[in-house]
Amino acid sequence: MRERELERLNKAWEVVNKEWGNFREDFLTPVRRLPSLIMSSGLAASLAYLKKEHPKVYEEISRWVSEIVWGEEEDLLEILRKGDIELYLWATEEALAFAGWLKRLGEAREKSGASK
């Protein structure tokens, strides 16, 4: 359990730092809203919204969650369509946890005033 949390943290840190300028502009607003969006609308609806409106955020969430729940990088919406309720719940839990790290790290970096 603790190891997975560290993996999430490291991956989220990588995403936030990959292109901070783009993250701040294109990622931070949807990432801030993502946990509540998932809780109110469900994972599949939230992912469909992200795929259309914020494709970069969708790609990062899809890449991470599909790797964890499916064992390989694949389109997460397609995986959810093929899977059962247990997989859907696991993917939801993983997406919420990863989004939480993206949000925390992005906000911390923004508050620190880091430009690069």
Image (cartoon, rainbow, N blue to C red):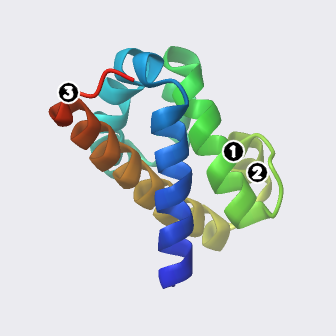
At 48% from the left edge and 83% from the top edge, which residue is drawn?
2
Q: Give how far across and how far down residue 104 sits, in percent.
A: 28, 48
Earlier residue among tags 2 and 1: 1
- Kindly identify which numbered label has been placed on residue 63: 1
Q: Secondary structure at mark 3?
A: loop
Asked whether, in this view, residue 87 is left or right of residue 96, the answer is right
At 70% from the left edge and 65% from the top edge, which residue is drawn?
69
- Kindly identify which numbered label has been placed on residue 113: 3
Earlier residue among tags 1 and 3: 1
**Which label lies toward us, 2 or 1?**
1
For residue 111, above or below residue 3: above
- Kindly identify which numbered label has been placed on residue 79: 2
Viewer-nearest residue: 21 or 82: 21
Q: CA distance from mark 2 to mark 3?
A: 38 Å
Q: Give how far across and how far down residue 92 sits, in percent.
A: 50, 59
Circle 2: residue type: Ile
Quadrant for the C terminus in the image: top left
